[in-house]
């Protein structure tokens, strides 16, 4: 009987072993490389990411523009970070001609160094930034960029910095501040007043029953603010029947609910007047907010209760502010404060 066929298994040659080992080593090398690349991709920060401690304090706010420059309803670039929480955000309105005022402020109640400003904010719950727009003057913009780099205490708005456009700048400030900062109050202040941040903090921290609050040193102003008056309007002025309360412009505060309502408004919903304080006052009247009058916000001299000092009614702020700020700071009743971090 013929024998059964036997299976034949060829014995691998030495060349086959070498080729197989090389292939396995190549696969292992690819696997290790892929793992390392994936690990680096996971641990590497995303583009544009910065450590929290290195984030610049100054911020540039860019607005989406429609048919008009004043179309400020939406913020197109304010950064990717969550809204910073404070009790009050103080926007110090300034301009390109106010370099000397900012210099004097940084030598008095507003610290010039980041650490001092941070300590002031931590002790009061208030954040402070200079607020300024833009200009087509390249030399002025260049100087501003140097100042921003040195002090890092600005909010830059993409709106033309012009006195006649202060109402638009003020609205832009409130909208930008609301987008960036989660605050109980948003404070508009001028760069020519002497401020006590500690007392402002205590004022804003008070409990209030009304969520929509318009806080300031109130004055009576005319409803009719047109350059020309109708024949019967001067009589109504004399009779005092056509006046409404609104805050003096150098400093006032709006609660978060009020600013939220402003942000939701279309820019053409309310009328813009030539004066910024009258414009805001008229809007507050239309929104039926609670007017809170505090005369400590418009003291002509430093007192134990003064919050903001300026030369009312002679000037709309301090007369000769660059010099007067430094003089006031030498007065003990002005500068002595448990929250003062200015280094003599």
Image: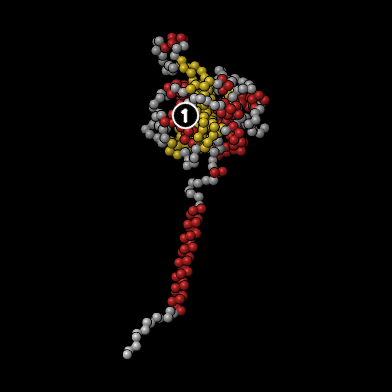
Q: Residues within 10 Å of mark 1 (few under 14, many from 20)?
A: some
In the rendered image, which quarter is residue 344 located in? top right
Name the side, left or right, on which 66 lies relative to 209: left
Seen in the picture, residue 142 relative to 19 is either above or below; the reply is above
Q: Residue at x 55, y 36 (%)?
A: 153
Seen in the picture, residue 45 relative to 174 is either above or below; the reply is below
Instruction: Give the image's coloring scheme.
Output: secondary structure
In the rendered image, which quarter is residue 295 located in? top right
Residue farthest to the left, as pictured: 1
Q: Nearer the viewer, residue 248 or 291?
A: 291
Residue placed under numbered mark 1 in the picture = 257
- Count of numbered circles on the image: 1
Q: Nearer the viewer, residue 263 or 320?
A: 263
Residue farthest to the bottom, as pictured: 1
Q: Residue at x 54, y 31 (%)?
A: 88
Name the side, left or right, on which 152 lies relative to 74: right
Q: Residue at x 55, y 21 (%)?
A: 294
Query: Residue 196 location, x and y as percent?
Result: 60, 27
- Could you tell me which quadrant the N terminus lies in? bottom left
Query: Residue 111 location, x and y as percent?
Result: 61, 33
Query: Residue 285 location, x and y as percent?
Result: 45, 21
Q: Residue at x 48, y 22 (%)?
A: 290
Q: Nearer the viewer, residue 283 or 235?
A: 283
* Res 258 visible: yes
Seen in the picture, residue 332 relative to 60 is either above or below; the reply is above
Query: Residue 87 location, x and y as percent?
Result: 54, 32
* Res 94 visible: no
Name the side, left or right, on which 291 lies relative to 302: left
Q: Secondary structure at mark 1?
A: helix
């Amino acid at each position: 009987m013929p024998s059964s066929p036997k299976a034949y298994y060829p014995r691998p040659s030495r060349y086959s072993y070498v080729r197989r080992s090389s292939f396995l080593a190549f696969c292992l090398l690819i696997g290790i490389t892929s793992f390392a690349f994936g690990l680096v991709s996971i641990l590497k920060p995303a583009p544009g990411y910065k450590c929290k401690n290195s984030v610049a304090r100054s911020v540039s706010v860019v607005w989406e523009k429609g048919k008009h420059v004043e179309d400020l309803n939406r913020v197109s670039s304010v950064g990717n970070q969550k809204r910073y929480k404070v009790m009050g955000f103080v926007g110090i309105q300034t301009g390109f001609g106010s370099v000397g005022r900012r210099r004097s402020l940084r030598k008095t109640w507003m610290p010039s160094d980041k650490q001092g400003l941070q300590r002031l904010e931590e002790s009061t719950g208030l954040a402070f930034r200079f607020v300024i727009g833009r200009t087509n003057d390249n030399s002025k913009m260049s100087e501003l960029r140097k100042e921003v780099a040195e002090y890092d205490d600005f909010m830059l708005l993409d709106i033309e910095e012009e006195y006649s456009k202060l109402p638009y700048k003020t609205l832009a400030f409130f909208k930008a501040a609301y987008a960036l900062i989660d605050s109980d109050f948003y404070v508009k202040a001028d760069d020519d007043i002497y401020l006590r941040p500690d007392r402002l903090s205590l004022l804003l921290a008070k409990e209030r029953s009304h969520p929509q609050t318009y806080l300031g040193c109130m004055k009576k102003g005319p409803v009719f603010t047109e350059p020309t008056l109708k024949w019967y309007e001067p009589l109504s002025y004399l009779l005092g029947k056509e006046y409404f309360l609104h805050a003096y412009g150098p400093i006032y505060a709006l609660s978060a609910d009020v600013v939220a309502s402003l942000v939701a408004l279309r820019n053409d919903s309310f009328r813009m007047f030539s004066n910024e304080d009258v414009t805001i006052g008229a809007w507050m009247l239309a929104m039926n907010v609670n007017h809170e009058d505090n005369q400590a916000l418009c003291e002509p001299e430093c007192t134990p209760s003064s919050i903001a000092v300026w030369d009312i009614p002679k000037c709309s702020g301090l007369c000769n502010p660059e010099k007067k700020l430094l003089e006031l700071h030498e007065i003990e009743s002005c500068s002595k404060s448990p929250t003062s971090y200015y280094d003599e």
